């Protein structure tokens, strides 16, 4: 039996995909086109006219050491966010998977942080680590450590990474947990009989069987770290100190809407688009080949 | 090479008792088949021997050493699972070598053992394939190969053939049996298929509701079933059971017929007669009403209701015993049986009381 739906005319199918096409056009293609167009111009300070500069904005950006630093910051930040959000999630999922009693309760509690919006999570962590009134920084002070993420690059980076990754742990946990439940019990038992102990089984049997899920989460988390962490960075550090936490997306915002350099901001958007596109293609082409069994 | 002893082995999940105490003593090199219907506890028993389930009571000994609290890996066993449980991301070679690799066997020796096992199981050409590229029978062989390369003291088989088609099952049945006898490894084999039990077992355990109903060689169980359950479970088609009564020297059946019969037992009983022990006879005391024939070629099965009662009766006749012009209609209507082939079972306990 053929399950595929067939249409006689073209009107109905067009009508059915129209909402999706419209949304893509209005919220994706139009702004992307605008960014591409604007990236070729420099507007005057009052926004009354703009001058065509060709690839001048790009040329300037690639020669700008702050922009190159932002690339490095982004790479560091997204790597850290991905690792910090995936490794604990996997560990928690493995532990929850071994539970017999109360697994449901643990699962529910572990999923809660996902419901917290990134900006709210940012404020939450900011309060805990606030240099004057934060609970954690006060305790750190008692222990003799002077926490100040407003001045210290590393501490600022650490804080935004943790705040960004925290909610994602729940999301990743959910996927890892489901994937673990889908690993056939008998395969694990066969490995146990073959003499492999828990961690050996985990690394040689379970982890390879989880690889499709791990790959999916890798892509999703990197994209998250690139784009959706804006709220966290904006609330906690605003990109500081000294641009130490200015990732590419934040720089698009601060150069464009704070610095009013719309041409450069548009050019950065275009570069970001290319970077993420390339990253995704790379992941699908090379990493995905190795995750199927 | 090892012996296996179960002493009053019990298992309960919470408050539910699933195995009520099984005793068994397996000799070195023996092939024991545990047979029983779904839910009788046969797989649980096997998994307890494997160490995949905890033992709630009693004692399991391998080679005289209690293994109740040992991890599966410390019991020197290998297990073949129903769904093969191959590692899907590893090649056939890696699957078979995994146990050796974990045991830190050096690579040359590992390769040699895998090659030898592959040779034996005709898997040499498939060593670099992944399990998903193999047929059901080949996967089954890989699972066997993984078990034999480690040269364990005991093989455990958990319904290994139930995912194969009928023809392959017959072939693999023979291969497993031959492999086991040539290696001489003590084996425990769980199945729900009484044909596998009959053909493969040195001795079989018939299990029902967490109890071993009978332990014996296949022919012992077939010829002298210890209980009504064992009688009906072993043998295909299943044994006919009629209500009857033994009084003095006479056995009377529920259809009103009677025959001379000597037995210690007196009073009402279950009367068991195997379908293949019933034969056509013009003066027979069993007459079949509205019977239907299933000609299988070598034999013909007749199913019908017994005249004079509402009992159903199955008769297994040699050859093609149906009318040529009227398919489905048997030649004979009246049947008889030998008193020597009658089994009596207690109404209450179901135990053999012939």
Image (spheres, coloured by chain):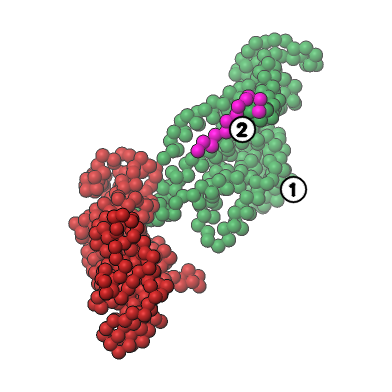
What's the residue at 28%, 74% (across, down)?
Answer: B284
User: Toward which corner of the image does residue A162 lie, by quadrant?
Assistant: top right
> Does B23 appear above or below A150?
below
Q: Position of residue B60 (x, y in %)?
A: 34, 70
Magenta stretch: give its range.
A1-12
For mark 2, what is the residue?
Answer: A226
Q: Position of residue A15 (x, y in %)?
A: 68, 28
Q: Chain of mark 2?
A: A
Quadrant that contains the N terminus of chain B: bottom left
Magenta span: chief secondary structure: loop
For mark 1, what is the residue?
Answer: A133
Q: Which chain is green?
A: A
Q: Position of residue B297 (x, y in %)?
A: 27, 55
- The colour chain B appears in is red
Question: What crowding class fits label 1: few (fewer than 14 Cα within 10 Å), some (14-19), or many (20 or more)?
Answer: few
What label does residue A146 carry, if any?
none
What's the residue at 67%, 14% (across, down)?
Answer: A40
Q: Is residue B150 left or right of residue B310?
A: left
């Amino acid at each position: 039996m053929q399950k595929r739906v067939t249409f006689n005319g073209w009107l109905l199918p067009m009508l059915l995909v129209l909402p999706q096409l419209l949304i893509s056009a209005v919220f994706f293609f139009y702004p992307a086109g605008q960014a591409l167009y604007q990236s070729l111009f420099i507007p005057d300070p009052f926004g009354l006219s703009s001058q065509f500069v060709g690839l001048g904005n790009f040329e300037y950006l690639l020669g700008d050491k702050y922009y190159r630093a932002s690339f490095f910051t982004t790479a560091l930040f997204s790597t850290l966010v991905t690792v910090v959000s995936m490794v604990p999630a996997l560990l928690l999922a493995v532990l929850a998977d071994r539970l017999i009693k109360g697994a449901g309760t643990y699962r529910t509690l572990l999923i809660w942080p996902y419901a917290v919006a990134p900006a709210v999570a940012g404020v939450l962590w900011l309060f805990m680590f606030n240099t004057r009134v934060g609970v954690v920084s006060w305790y750190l002070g008692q222990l003799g450590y002077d926490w100040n993420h407003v001045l210290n690059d590393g501490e600022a980076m650490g804080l935004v990474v943790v705040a960004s990754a925290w909610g994602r742990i729940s999301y990743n946990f959910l996927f890892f947990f489901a994937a673990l439940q889908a690993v056939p019990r008998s395969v694990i038992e066969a490995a146990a009989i073959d003499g492999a102990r828990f961690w050996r089984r985990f690394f040689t049997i379970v982890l390879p069987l989880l690889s499709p899920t791990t790959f999916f989460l890798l892509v999703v988390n990197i994209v998250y770290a690139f784009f959706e962490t804006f709220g966290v960075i904006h609330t906690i550090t605003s990109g500081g100190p000294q641009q130490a936490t200015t990732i590419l997306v934040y720089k698009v915002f601060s150069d464009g809407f704070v610095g009013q350099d719309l041409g450069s901001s548009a050019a950065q958007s275009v570069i970001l688009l290319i970077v993420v596109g390339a990253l995704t293609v790379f992941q699908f082409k090379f990493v995905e080949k190795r995750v199927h069994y | 090479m090892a012996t296996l002893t179960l002493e009053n082995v019990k298992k309960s999940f919470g408050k539910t008792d699933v195995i009520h105490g099984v005793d068994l003593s397996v000799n070195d090199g023996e092939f024991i088949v545990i047979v029983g219907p779904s839910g009788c506890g046969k797989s649980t028993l096997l998994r307890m021997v494997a160490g995949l389930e905890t033992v709630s009571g009693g004692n399991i000994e391998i080679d005289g050493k209690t293994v109740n609290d040992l991890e599966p890996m410390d019991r020197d066993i290998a297990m073949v699972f129903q769904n093969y449980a191959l590692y899907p991301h590893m090649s056939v070679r890696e699957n078979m070598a995994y146990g050796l690799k974990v045991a830190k066997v050096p690579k040359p020796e590992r390769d040699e053992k895998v090659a030898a096992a592959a040779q034996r199981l005709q898997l040499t050409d498939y060593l670099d394939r992944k399990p998903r590229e193999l047929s059901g029978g080949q996967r089954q062989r890989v699972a066997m190969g993984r078990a034999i390369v480690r040269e364990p003291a005991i093989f455990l088989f958990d319904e290994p053939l139930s995912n194969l088609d009928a023809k392959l099952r017959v072939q693999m049945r023979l291969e497993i049996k031959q492999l086991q006898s040539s290696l001489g490894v003590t084996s425990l084999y769980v199945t729900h298929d009484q044909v596998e039990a009959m053909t493969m077992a040195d001795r079989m355990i018939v299990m029902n509701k967490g109890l071993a109903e009978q332990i014996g060689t296949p022919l012992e169980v077939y010829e002298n079933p210890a209980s009504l359950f064992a009688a009906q479970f072993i043998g295909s088609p299943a044994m006919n059971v009629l209500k009857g009564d033994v009084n003095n020297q006479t056995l009377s059946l529920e259809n009103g017929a009677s025959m001379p019969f000597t037995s210690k037992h007196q009073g009402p009983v279950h009367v068991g007669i195997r379908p293949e022990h019933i034969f056509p006879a013009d003066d027979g005391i069993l007459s079949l009403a509205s019977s239907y024939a299933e000609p299988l070629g070598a034999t013909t099965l007749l199913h019908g209701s017994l005249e004079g009662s509402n009992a159903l009766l199955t008769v297994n006749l040699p050859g093609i015993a149906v009318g040529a012009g009227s398919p489905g209609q048997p030649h004979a209507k009246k049947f008889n049986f030998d008193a020597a082939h009658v089994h009596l079972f207690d109404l209450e306990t179901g135990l053999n009381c012939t």
